[in-house]
Every structure is written in structure tokens, then in C-alpha cells.
Amino acid sequence: MVNDLKKSGPVTVLVAYDKTGDRVSEGQSFRFISLPTPGGKALSSLPNERLKGNLDLGKISGSKRDVTSEARSTDAIDLSASALDSMADAGRALKNLANAYMNSAWKSQTFYFWTTTDKPSDVFDQFSTPAHSTYKGYGFYIGSNGDQGLSYEDVCGDKAITFTPPSPVTTVDNQGGTSTLTAYSNSGVNRSTQGSNRICEGGGYYAREDVYDGRKSFMLNFGTGGSITSSPNGLWRLKVAGQEVARYDFDMASPIVDGKPTALIPRAKFITAGGQVTGVEVELYRWTGSQYEKLDDLGGFRRLVSEMNASITRTSDDKEISTRLKIGEDNKITGAFDSSDVGKEGGARNPPVATSDVKYMAVYYVIANASYRIEFRN
């Protein structure tokens, strides 16, 4: 029996806020009520089916984003100490619910990105090394609910679209060069197509027009490739033609604290046979404060994750080949490149790939509206 990553039990997040009648001020006042874990972490995502009974939080202390209950996680939840600690770390992604609360017209998804000195050939039939990974940064997808009265031409320059951080941010390019950015905008973008979709891009701004069943929407991408390294406090503001249409707080769910990850780092081994990549095995590692430690109990993680994939991008056609990862009863995470997974548009999305045709490989997982990705490049 395997977990398809979409059947985990429901999770409750306890939030206190100041009721004002204004969604923005209420979202900014969110305080996440957490239960201390055995490792001293703050667990604010509670797995409903593992609650031991009625939960008495006792006295709540603290005044910032995270406030702490008197009740301890081990008193209330039937999970191992390791699972509770890992769930506390991974559950930080759920704090992005404040952004969903503040915005209905434009929804955000944050993606966090790691690179590693392990090259593709280094992880053929042997595991990568989590300590070789380096956090590169993050970026955003902002999706519209419907077309919001906009056309493709509007989002691609006819109307000014700006996305402004609360203070300047530092970005890094693929060569390691850094720059300071005070705002993203659609000024001077180039219009083109991507498959059957119309797009435009330039200056860190990307927009795609999506049309499904006659309904149009737009997807905007800022910080392409996870290039934003700093995470300022306060609200990022999205404006269309000078009118604010959305706002987001991305710092509250940052997976980096004091330069180290709170997110789980995938350790990957891509399996080969006959000169082809035919499968993948993945393990998850957590930073303990002094070293990376393998997460053996995935009971907490599997209750939060909604999607987990491994991918290979081919050199020959620059196409990404992807396989869904599954968690087995033995807590092993595996996937196959064997043409067994048929995509929505027909054809296998996971055929074998010649080792000589591998451009780069990646593993990523999704929790709530945040994704976490590590890439193995030459």
C-alpha cells in the first residue's frame, strides 16, 4: 500500500486574529497558536485524526506571529517525537493561508529553490549529499481568479502591472551575480508563445494567458527560477494601472531561519539500467541545528504534502520528463521512469531517459500553496 499524497487526513491550523471587518488588517494580525514539540519546535498544524481527544490549550503566551500554548504536542497528538518535529518544520508553509485570507482575486504560490554541488552523474545509482545543498532563493506565482477584466494585451504592457516588496530585495542570477530590485513590472516585456499559450516576459516578470473550457485566467511569475535571496518584513503589493488589487506577506512562511533550512531537504538517487534512467529513490533530511539528519518517520510529512515529483530535463529537446513519487508503508519514497504514467494530453509523462541525454534533474514537493525544489545540474 502506498500513499498517493492526496489522501492524507485533514489538518487544523489554530489562528487568533484581531477582528476589524477588513481582510487585510485581519490577515496582518494573524497569530499562529502552536504546541511545543519534543525538539522545542512550534507545531501549528494539527493532524485531526491523530488528536488524542478534546484539546485544552491552557494558557496562551506570546505576542508575535507565533504564540505558544501550555499544552504540549505529545499530550495532544499520537505521533512520534520525530514526526512531530518534522511536521512543525514542514507546517510553516501553512502560514501562507494568511495570503489566501487577504486575497480572493489573485492567489499566490511561493516556490523555494535549492541548488547543490552534486551533479547528475554524482547521483546515478548513489544518493546525493544534503550538506552539499545551498538555498538559492524564492519566487512567486500569482494566479488570477478569472480574467479580472484584463486582456492578454493588458497584462503584457498595455496596462502597468507592478509588484513591489516592502523594501528592496536582493536577487541572484544563474552565474551567481547579485542585484537589488525595488519593484517588478511589465514594462518593456517581449510577447511570444509557449506551446499553445500566449506569454510575455522580461526583467524578472513573466505572464501567461490560460484558457480552459472558454474561461480565461492569467498566471504571473516573479523572481523566475527562485532568484530572490532576501525576505523583508511587511506586505508585497500588486497593482494594476495604479490600483492595488492584492497584497502578500511572504516572510512569515520563510523556510530559512538564521541561514539554515526549516524545510526538509530531499536526498535523491536516480536509478539506471542499460544506459537509461529508469527510476528514482528519495529520502528526506532535516537540519537539527548542527547537522542533517534523515527523517525515518514520515507520519507528519505525509499529512501535509499534496504532491511530490522527480524530473529530468533532456538535453536533446529541453523537455522536462516527470514522475510522481509515492510513499510506501515502509516510508520509502520511490518513482519510476518507465512510461507507466500517462499525462492529461495523452502519452507517457515518465519515459526512460538516456543518461547521455540528461541536462539536469530535480526533486520537488508541495505543501499548501508552497513548493520546495532542489536541482542537480552540471
Image (spheres, rainbow, N blue to C red):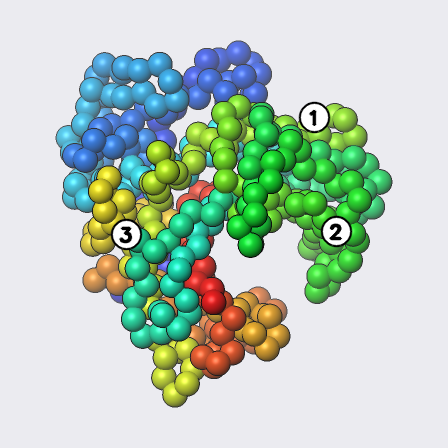
Q: Mark 2, residues whose alpha carbon is within 10 Å: few (<14), some, or many (≥20)?
A: many
Residues 41 and 123: in front is 123
Residue 368, visible in the rendered structure: yes
Of labels 1 and 3, the one closer to you? 3
Residue ID for mark 2: 200
Residue 154, visible in the rendered structure: no
Residues 92 and 204: in front is 204
- In percent of width and height, residue 157 lies at 81, 42
Q: Are marks 1 and 2 in contact (CB under 8 Å)?
A: no
Task: Residue at 35%, 42% (x, y): give it.
Answer: 261
Q: Which mark is residue 285?
A: 3
Residues 316 and 102: in front is 316
Task: Residue at 60%, 36% (x, y): give it.
Answer: 180
Of the image marks 2 and 3, the number of the one nearer the N terminus: 2
Of the image marks 1 and 2, the number of the one nearer the N terminus: 2
Task: Residue at 66%, 45% (x, y): give it.
Answer: 204
Q: Secondary structure at mark 3?
A: strand
Q: Are marks 1 and 3 in contact (CB under 8 Å)?
A: no
Q: Secondary structure at mark 2?
A: strand
Q: Is residue 106 left or right of residue 42?
A: right
Spatial CA span between label 1 and label 2:
22 Å
- In percent of width and height, residue 192 lies at 78, 58
Of labels 1 and 2, the one closer to you? 2
Residue ID for mark 1: 244
Amino acid type assigned to the residue bearing label 2 in the image:
Cys
